[in-house]
Image: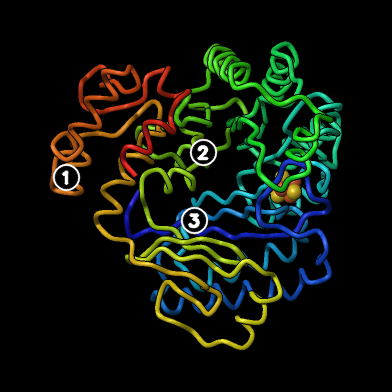
Amino acid sequence: MDAENYGLYFHFPFCLRRCRYCDFYSTERKLARIPAYVRALMREIEWTGAAGGSPCADSVFFGGGTPSLLEPGQLGRVLDRIRKSFRLDPQAEITLEANPGTVDRARLAAFRAAGVNRLSLGIQSADDGELRMLGRIHTYAEAEQACRDARRAGFANISLDLIYGLPGQTEAAWTHTLERALALGPEHLSLYALTLERGTELARAVRRGALPAPEDDAAAEMYERAEEMLAAAGYRHYEISNWARDASPAAGAESADLCVPGFPARACRHNLRYWLIRPYLGFGAGAHGCAAGKRYANIRSVEKFIDRIRTGTPRRFPLTPAASRSSAHTREDELREAMWLGLRLTEAGVSREAYRSRFGEDYCVRFRKEIDSSITDGLLEWTRNGEALRLTPRGRLLGNRVFQLFV
Ligand code: SF4
């Protein structure tokens, strides 16, 4: 992965209905503004590409929100504009997050034809009672159908999102969800422990006793259960919450060209940028970016985003008038991020040699105290060849305790 290459993230903050656990930035009220939002995105792409001198890009990620609410024609126009404004690698990974309640076979085929080559489906659970508790707009049968439709539409790279540690969820129910998800043969799985975010409906229901509080111990057991089952099914656990296959029976010819050395073939190339501290550009309301020595965030309002782009003028790369916050991203920031984000890479860990050649110093000198105490506490270990530092199985359960030492 070349540091001159950018990953492009597009935030699409529209949903049909808010899920009860979600605190991401998205709105269910402004669907009529989608065409104006897409026009603003196209302008933002054009300005950023021009300000950066048509930079190279090798991954595109449409996240949200629910970007699968876009019409395939709209998404195709956004991709065309990207190809005009950036030097987009012909083998670029192009991911679309999709809610199973918003897609059918024809739409999926049209997204595929528009250039999307990786689908991330938020199926969350195989239990309809759990899906209702979460406020999802689909049943499990619909999620399964969406996955089958995606295969028929030509997707050879499918990721499934699941959530565990739900109020009242049993280990048997979680095992059943994992079994059903594995039976769909995804190339990639992202498993997230439910966090009760303040202000969400689910957090309020737990607080007033309408739902039992999720238990940390139960969630830890579910995580370990997933580790066992996914390893047995041939998935590599490459990041704390992410598993991927090396190859897939469904893989097309394109797949081999999309991998990052040292990681499973179907690891998410775009998300690896975040953990390997590689530059990415954010587009759309609420999107974040980190490039050219700056961290920045776009304004978190659909209306203000559209307005700022409509009335503003281009700014110096990587910013556009939509950026409401920016700060320097210094070498000191990178040195620390390379540790606490790199340690999320459960298999590879943080390579001592790669760190030394990138920053010209040894992390064992700068962080000696933090590393020694984490090893003593059984949270960090050296890889078998002694070249990289990584989390132990116990450290994976207590990752935040380790990360905060390096922040
Ligand atoms: S679909 Fe995704 S972004 Fe939208 S409310 Fe649900 S979890 Fe949040």
The residue labelled by disc 3 is 90
Q: Residues within 10 Å of mark 1 (few under 14, many from 20)?
A: few
Alpha-carbon distance for marks 2 and 1? 29 Å
Q: How is the image coloured?
A: rainbow
SS state under label 3: strand
Label 2 or label 1, whichever comes before in sequence order: 2
Residue 111, image x and y in percent? 71, 53
Q: What numbered label is drawn on residue 255?
A: 2
Q: Is mark 2 within 8 Å of ligand 1?
A: no
SS state under label 2: helix
Q: Residue at point 65% right, 21% down?
A: 215
Q: Residue at point 73% right, 15% down?
A: 170
Alpha-carbon distance for marks 1 and 3? 29 Å
Please give left or right for residue 399 compared with residue 118 in the image.
Answer: left
Nearer to the camera, 252 or 268: 268
Residue 402, image x and y in percent? 36, 31
Q: Residue at point 37% right, 19% down?
A: 392
Alpha-carbon distance for marks 3 and 2? 12 Å
**Disc 3 marks which amino acid?**
Pro
The residue labelled by disc 1 is 357
**Disc 1 marks which amino acid?**
Ser
Nearer to the camera, 140 or 127: 127
Q: Is mark 3 within 8 Å of ligand 1?
A: no
Mark 2 or mark 1, which is nearer to you? 1
Residue 98 visible in rendering: no
